[in-house]
Image (cartoon, helix red, strand yellow):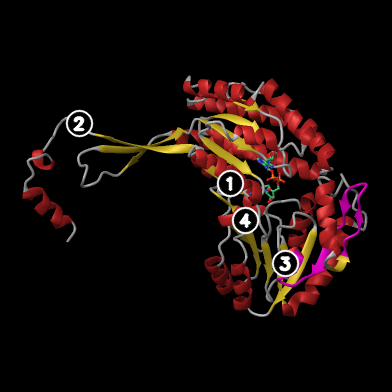
Amino acid sequence: MNSEYLFNRLKESYRAGVNHTPENRIEALRSLRKMVTEQEGPLCEAISRDFGKPYFEAFTSEIFTVVHEIDYHLKQLRKWFTPKRVSDSITTFPSKSTVTFRPLGTVLIIGAWNYPVHLTLMPLIGALSAGNTVLLKPSEIASETSSLLASLFERYMDPKVVSVAEGGAELTTELLTLPFDHIFFTGSTRVGKIVMKAAAEQLIPVTLELGGKSPAIVHKDADIAVSARRIWWGKTMNAGQICVAPDFAAVHESVYEAFIEESKKVLSQFFREDYRVKVNYTQIINETHFDRLSNLLDSSIIKFGGSVNRDTRFIEPALIDAKWDDLIMEDEIFGPLLPVITYRTPDELTKHLLKMSAPLALYLFTESESLIKQITETIPFGGGCVNDTISHLTNPSLPFGGIGDSGMGSYHGRASFETFSRKQSLLKKGFWPDPRLRYPPYSNSLIKWLKTWIQ
Ligand code: NAD
């Protein structure tokens, strides 16, 4: 089935109101929940075939998070759906004003490969709970998961509510010519720009969930053992192929050596010198990314780690001694290499961070409230944690998204519902009273009265 046919079918069914009522939306979310819980085994196996993600990671980050999000929407949806009465104004009295969240229409969701289930289904949940019909385009790079998702959707979901289009850049280019009501894209900043440019041609609003170089800052007062453990947890999960992985560490010079020693300990505790790919550790997605990361290793000063095996697409986590202007500090790493840079003062650190593009996440390890205030007030970033990495995105009450090069718009929980809705404002008046004051011929009495309000 070609993409135009799929689009037209979804558009027609949207117009016919297939996913409009709260009952319709709840039914769609329940079908999705059934699909994910019944098929968790095959889904985790497909992800493992794509790039060796261990079952533990696949279950916790691709299955559990998705079901948790569905349950959150099922619980809140009726409340979000109910029109909100807002206060009247002096300019409209007497009247009744309401704001209602309406669906956008037929939306396109384009997924990335690194969390091929999570990144495709999390936005879908919001799109369904907001009452849209949806065309999903999973990443072709995680091809096993993409084709399994396509067949599962046919089996579990009404194709008039959600359809899946499989393919790569060529298909995405074709989809971007269709008059969707919204485009939700997860991927690189480079392709994000292509998507936004194409969307601008038809004035289609976009949400862009992109990447960036997310710093982990370790201040001198931090608990170094806990900081190292939490940073390496975020860096080795999915072999660092996470949009919110700590990209590099900026460590206060007085705790640099301690951080290195703790890092060695942490990695030997995590992996006991045996990485057991597919059990405890993930492969690099393909040869292109493997070669890109190997080249970065070749151009870096490696403090420890960093062994590689191209046959198994294995890259050992590596701690790299780095400077702000090193090659590895140019682009998002998206792999298990952690450059560590030292700083002397928070002012020096913020000066460097402000020269970089706004990251998707920022992690700060400290107990100093004044440092937390300084960093969070001066550095723009999408979201983050104090004394942890990554976990902010698992709380559905926190909107998740980037800023500048790391994206625009946000989702998760209520933010997803709002992203896939438009706010419809409605002012309702009775036929009485109908004072003549605002109608021509004009008189000064209304002006005089209004002036009393702005004095
Ligand atoms: P990508 O930009 O290469 O691909 C994303 C999607 O765009 C895929 O579906 C692909 O088919 C499509 N695409 C690729 N080239 C295209 C082109 N020329 N024209 C039109 N469409 C095209 O990204 P990726 O490699 O799948 O993912 C890695 C990137 O995604 C990283 O930068 C990472 O930080 C980012 N990311 C962001 C988030 C987030 O939530 N913010 C999550 C995961 C990944």
Q: Indicate yes or no whether the magenta region holds residue 322.
A: yes
Q: CA distance from mark 1 to mark 4?
A: 11 Å
Q: CA distance from mark 4 to mark 3?
A: 15 Å
- Under mark 4, the amino acid is Leu
Q: CA distance from mark 3 to mark 1?
A: 26 Å
Question: Can you give x and y, in whole percent of width and height, for residue 377 in the image?
Answer: 52, 67
Numbered disc 2: secondary structure: loop
Disc 1 marks which residue?
A: 208
Disc 4 marks which residue?
A: 360
Disc 2 marks which residue?
A: 430
Disc 3 marks which residue?
A: 249
Query: Which is closer to the viewer, label 2 or label 4?
Result: 4
- Under mark 2, the amino acid is Gly
Numbered disc 4: secondary structure: loop
Mark positioned earlier in the residue sequence (2 or 1) = 1
Numbered disc 3: secondary structure: strand
Mark positioned earlier in the residue sequence (4 or 3) = 3
Q: CA distance from mark 2 to mark 3?
A: 62 Å
**Ligand 1 lies in which image quarter?**
top right
In the figure, residue 442 lies in which quadrant? top left
Res 307 seen here: yes
- Under mark 3, the amino acid is Ala
Question: Can you give x and y, in whole percent of width and height, for residue 317 in the image?
Answer: 84, 59
Q: CA distance from mark 2 to mark 1?
A: 43 Å
Query: Which is closer to the viewer, label 2 or label 1?
Result: 1
- Under mark 1, the amino acid is Leu
